[in-house]
Amino acid sequence: MASERDRLEKLTVVALRDLAKKKLGAGTSKLRTKAMLVDALLSGSLETASSGQPVSQRTPLSSAKAKPAPIRVTKGPARSRTTARKPVENAVVPAVAASAPSEPLLALPLDAQTLLVRWPASASGAAGERLELEVTSDGRPERTVPVAARSRHAYVRSLSAGPVYRARLVARSPDGRRRVIGLPSRPVVFFPQASAFRTAERFVQYAWAEPAASAQSAGEAAPGAPLPPDAELAVLGLTRSAGGSATSPSGSTAGPVLGWLVSSRRPTSFAN
Amino acid sequence: MAGTFALVLHAHLPYVRHPEHAHSVEEAWLFEAVADCYLPLLDVFSRLAEEGIAYRVTVSLSPTLLAMWSDELLRERCARYLHARCELGRREMERTVADAGLREVAAFHARRFEGIREWYEVRFRRDLTSAFRRLADGGYLELATTAATHAFLPILQPPEAVRAQIALGVRAHAATFGKRPLGFWLPECGYAAGLEEPLAAEGIRYTFLDSHALGEGASRARFGVYAPVLTESGVAVFARDPESSEQVWSGEVGYPADPLYREFHRDLGFELAPERLGPVLRPAGRPGFTGFKYHRVTGSEPKELYDPAAGEARAMEHARHFAARRLEQSRLLERAMQRPAAIVAPYDAELFGHWWFEGPRFLEAVLRELSQSELRLATPADVLRGEPLLEVGAPAASSWGKGGDDRTWLNPRTGALVHSVNRAGLELRELVSSFGRLARSRCSDLRQAARELLLAQASDWLFLVANQTFAGYAEARVREHLEAFGRLASGIRSQKDIAGLVSDRARRWPIFEMLDVEPFAEASDRGEGQ
């Protein structure tokens, strides 16, 4: 697919239009850009290029070279390229190579409740199969959305913050059998409700070290080293109550006062 | 021990340079900011230093802004911009001769632009970078940096792209100022878990986040936003004080909405006949801002004429009020916390002078007031040098945009652009890992591909598209850089000779000349842990 795309992208728009007329027949005039012409020729259909979003927002996904980027993948150790490509959740039902893209679905949180899922043009079902998008939440089924393969994207709305979502494309045969197409998306969490300030309930005495004089010394005096355990100090008498207040060594409560001082209102900025 | 007040100004503009046009509306963003904001701020900082006022301010300067300040073409055009305003000032003095009130405010602007031009050409010799460096060397300013092209990092992928934005921002700063920065401004205060790790790897000591990053209600940090929190990686985070922020930023209760202040939106460029403005002031015959704004906010229509003396007097009143509130706040906090409070007030530098015309004079008065008070003017590094006891914690994902999250930069209008940029990021990682070590001859090709990607990643483009302001330009810029990136990547993969394309593009957008592609490589290819 990549080489075919590369070959087509080297052609001029005029040549692509001629080719599209020969291959796809009438109706190619609505393919206004080179990307639309290439998409249509790759998919063998005019619908691919004309459906979905406005032209300015269309982004071809079918290059096999690039891997789609998940946004705010749940934090974990750095993975090598080999492990990053391994399917995680489709071990039971293997992917079918003939219609399966080699890259995971792209799942992109569009706002606090909406996930945009895109899949490459190479994802398709066999004759008679219906395509569905399955969304799991913390590993459990959350939503199944019927989709048209050629639309290549779907919005999954009204999701909530907190769980780890993952999307995958499945094909369902007329007798109800189900098989996973390609690789599921990487896990996605919504921003920022899935994250709150977390305290280790400990205090350390900060140790300042002046930076080295040289501008170019790469390993210069970084405070980046993890905090040594012996730097940790107990704060005498400071304990956090269930209500969020804290008691100082002298017994006065700081929490309610701070609660008043730390306004929860955020001003509307001119710039943002 | 006294509490501290840290004033932080973040100066940034996206990289805009259009030699192909005699006049560019987008380039004027820079010239307006130079005239309205950067030069007046430099004037304030320099005068205070000359008078021996002991002040400390943190200024973060973005690499794209530094690149534009040192660009000869843009310097020349900025001089032309100022010259044109001086000419307009002279013409306005003649035009308004019959109207004493109008003539007075016209004369004020004419004198102002003459003064600004003198600062630019004579006092600072067109070299704003050196002027900031001198103030930093003198111990008045602490200069910080930000992401290479100001990408909104929480939505940037892959992690190597984030690392590269941070590493190249730090290196650009070090190359410009001769020392590595201690502070890093996360663009738009955008934070997501893990961002502190690449900051620590670059030797960064502190960064700034919005207030809610340190929690709200019961889950807040022990001292709220009034003490830095130390992350496990060793980077300290300082959060924005909501009160000092609201007093300046709020459109409803903030100082800049005062009726005596100059009105931003009423500009001669939209009111005077084109023949009176001259072709220089109206590129392509379109109306545009001239900087000659004759009216005050007033609070109702019709707007009344601006009175510079009354505006300045009000700025002094507001400065005294602001300083008094910080003192009162510091005392209250110290009593409650039983330790000195660290109040941090970060703002966009471009607010002062550009949006809020009297802003630089307000800041000058605040610094004068506080320098004589028990509240200590400090930078975040000064606070940390005091080796305070810090809570260890993990900030919440946050930004200072609308809603406190990422919706300003990631939304239905920008989703496709974000996706395309991130795909290119993944592709560059693959290219650097595959070709970076194979052939040195490909280095310049990879570097140019990296430059194109960096330029496409700026948060400004997403902001403009989301807000439908210069959306066409912003989207075209992203697409242009990605299209060039695609051609370069294709050439690299097929091992073609693309030297011509590389040199054309490097000439077109001459930034990050000494760029190193190493940060874009996967961790395993950099010899780091898996």
Image (tube, coloured by chain):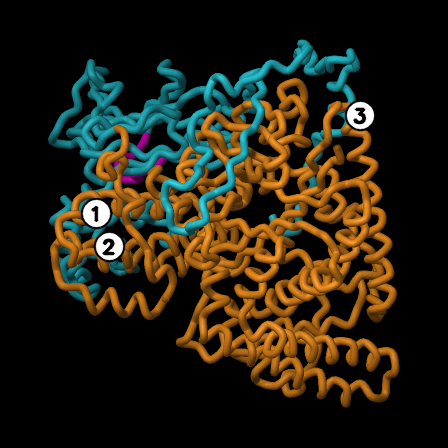
Assign a secondary structure to mark 1. Answer: helix
Whichever of callouts 3 and 1 sits on the residue coming sooner in the sequence is 3
Q: Which residues are magenta?
A: A147-155
Q: Which residue is mark 2?
A: B446
Q: What amino acid type should be assigned to the residue bearing mark 3?
A: Arg
Q: Would you say the residues marked 3 and 2 are in contact, meaning their CB atoms lie under 8 Å apart?
A: no
What color is chain B drawn in?
orange
Q: Which residue is mark 3?
A: B335
Q: Is residue A165 left or right of residue B468?
A: left
- Disc 3 versus disc 1: distance between alpha carbons? 57 Å
Q: What amino acid type should be assigned to the residue bearing mark 2?
A: Leu
- Residue positioned 38% across, 29% down in the render: A73
Q: Would you say the residues marked 2 and 1 are in contact, meaning their CB atoms lie under 8 Å apart?
A: yes
**Chain represented in cyan:** A
Whichever of callouts 3 and 2 sits on the residue coming sooner in the sequence is 3
Q: Position of residue A196 (x, y in %)?
A: 55, 24
- Residue positioned 61% across, 82% down in the render: B84
- Dot 2: chain letter: B
- Crowding around mark 1 (Cα neighbors within 10 Å: few <14, some 14 to 19, many 20+) is many
Assign a secondary structure to mark 2. Answer: helix
- Dot 3: chain letter: B
Q: Position of residue A115 (x, y in %)?
A: 42, 32
- Disc 3 versus disc 2: distance between alpha carbons? 57 Å
Where is the N terminus of chain B found, in terms of image quarters? top right
* Residue B505 visible: yes
- Disc 2 versus disc 1: distance between alpha carbons? 8 Å
Label ID, residue B431? 1
Callout in the foreground (3, 1): 3
- Residue positioned 26% across, 28% down in the render: B530
